[in-house]
Every structure is written in C-alpha cells, then in structure tokens.
C-alpha cells in the first residue's frame, strides 16, 4: 500500500537535514518554527516540492512530498 508523506527538510551547511515527517504539507510547515526562525513561505508550483521557506533569496527550509510504500 502507498501513502503520501510530507517531509520538512532544513538547510544545514551545504545540504538538507530531514527533521519531520507529516501527513499534510501544512503540518510540516508549522513544525518548521521549531528549527528555523523567520522566513516567508512560498509555493513553488512543483508537485514534489510544494513549499520553500525563504529569507530574502536564501532558502532556509523546504517541504517535499514523497510516496512511502508499506506492506500489508
């Protein structure tokens, strides 16, 4: 069985660290306040990466959508 999940990834150094998995993009977005101060959320229009948290032109975090498959 497949299920969509939204993953909050925070920018650290030159890459991203996965810090939270959620059922909705909004839940992942709300969780960002625990890891990142400030920024403005912007929709990307992309299916696999619907949201980015920006501070000017610098990306602080992003929400990505993935499919998880689990047995049953």
Image (cartoon, rainbow, N blue to C red):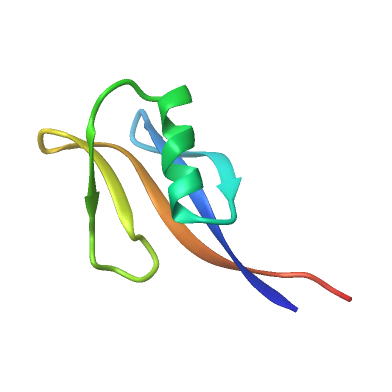
In the image shown, does 18 or 6 lie closer to the viewer? Answer: 6
In the picture shown, does residue 39 fall above or below 4? above
Based on the displayed image, in which of its 4 quarters is residue 20 positioned?
top right
- Count of all numbered marks drawn on residues in the image: 0
Residue 65 is situated, as x and y percent measured from the top left of the image, at 47, 62
Based on the displayed image, in which of its 4 quarters is residue 53 positioned?
top left
Q: Which residue in the rendered view is the most extreme toward the right?
A: 72
In the picture shown, does residue 46 fall above or below 55? below
Give the quarter of the figure containing the C terminus: bottom right
Q: Which residue in the rendered view is the most extreme toward the top?
A: 37
Residue 66 is situated, as x and y percent measured from the top left of the image, at 53, 65
In the picture shown, does residue 16 fall above or below 26? above
Q: Is residue 8 visible?
A: no
Is 43 on the left-hand or right-hand side of 61?
left
In the image shown, does 9 or 27 lie closer to the viewer? Answer: 27
Q: Residue at x 23, y 30 (%)?
A: 39
Residue 59 is situated, as x and y percent measured from the top left of the image, at 24, 38
Give the quarter of the figure containing the N terminus: bottom right
Is 11 on the left-hand or right-hand side of 67?
left
In the image shown, does 15 or 20 lie closer to the viewer? Answer: 20
Q: Residue at x 85, y 74 (%)?
A: 71
Q: Which residue in the rendered view is the most extreme toward the left?
A: 56
Q: Is residue 32 visible?
A: yes
In the picture shown, does residue 12 fall above or below 25? above
Residue 6 is situated, as x and y percent measured from the top left of the image, at 51, 55
């Amino acid at each position: 069985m497949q299920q969509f999940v939204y993953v909050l990834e925070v920018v650290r150094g030159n890459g991203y660290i996965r810090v939270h998995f959620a059922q909705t993009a909004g839940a992942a977005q709300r969780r960002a306040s625990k890891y990142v101060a400030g920024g403005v959320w912007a929709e990307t229009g992309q299916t696999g990466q619907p949201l980015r948290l920006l501070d000017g032109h610098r990306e602080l975090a992003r929400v990505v959508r993935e499919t998880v498959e689990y047995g049953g």
